[in-house]
Image: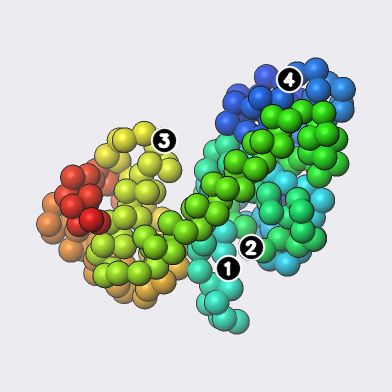
Amino acid sequence: MASEQKLTCIGCPVRPLSLFADVPDSNLKEVGFQPAIQTYRSGDTIIHADSDDDALYTIRSGMVKLEGAVSNTHSRIVRLLKTGDTLGLHALHQAKHPHTARALGTVELCRIPHHVIHHVGQEVCELKTAISQRIAEDVAMADMWITDFSSGAVPRRLAKFLLYLSKLQTGSSENEVTLLSRDDMAATLGVRQESISRTLTQFKSEGLLDARSRNTFIMDKQGLVRLAE
């Protein structure tokens, strides 16, 4: 269950990363927008696939996974979203959300009604540009997800995913990575959980991963890059 609080948009520390980064303060003041901040616990469902909603969400903190159903009992993780990303963007122009969104750890979201997006978008071309850019980035990410994480040997796929996950978490070229659960990594790469566990054991024995805590590791980045390529 999400908790909710009221804040203001102007001066928000996440705004430079959001859709509203280039929207003048005056336009936000005119629409009188007061965001609703919602907090979710790890594993909470934020959006159900095929559900109707009249809002999209900026991720203020934490990470969100998007799941697509493969069968009645199995699903694949088709995207990971981080702080500053927009959740529910595709539902802005279509009636239903295509994926189920769940919290990975504690997540804080800013709920932005569609009418605010449409109203500001009529006045500010920068918002239209930001939306178009994010949709294009989402398409490019979908292509990468297929080519990098859904084909090839498991060690190669996992090496690519760990490098991607580290960059997603740190926002830089740091060597640290905090693993997702074995189930989530298996659902991302489309393999069995046992394959993930076996490959991680291999990476540790080869010195590609050095444990710092239960789920956080220092990567041999060059070694993983060689394996990924």
Q: Residues within 10 Å of mark 3 (few under 14, many from 20)?
A: few
Residue 179 horizontal side relative to residue 76, left or right: left
Q: Amino acid at mark 4?
A: Pro
Q: Is residue 37 among what the camera can see?
A: no
Image: 183 above or below 87: below
Residue behind mark 4: 24
Q: Is residue 9 left or right of residue 201?
A: right
Q: Residues within 10 Å of mark 2 (few under 14, many from 20)?
A: many
- Residue drawn at (82%, 51%), measured in percent from left and top? 54
> Percent x, y for residue 36?
77, 37
Disc 3: which residue: 171
Kindly identify which residue carries mark 2.
100
- Nearer the observer: mark 3 or 4; the answer is 4
SS type, badge 2: strand
Marks 1/4: CA–CA distance: 36 Å
Disc with the residue nearer the chain's start (1 vs 3): 1
Q: Residue at the location (25% across, 56% down)?
A: 228
Question: Residue 124, image x and y in percent?
Answer: 77, 28
Q: Amino acid at mark 2?
A: Thr
Mark 1 to mark 3 CA distance (whole Å): 26 Å
Q: Earlier in the sequence, mark 2 or mark 3?
A: 2
- Residue at horizontal 54 percent and vertical 46 percent from the top: 137
Give residue 198's quadrant in the image: bottom left
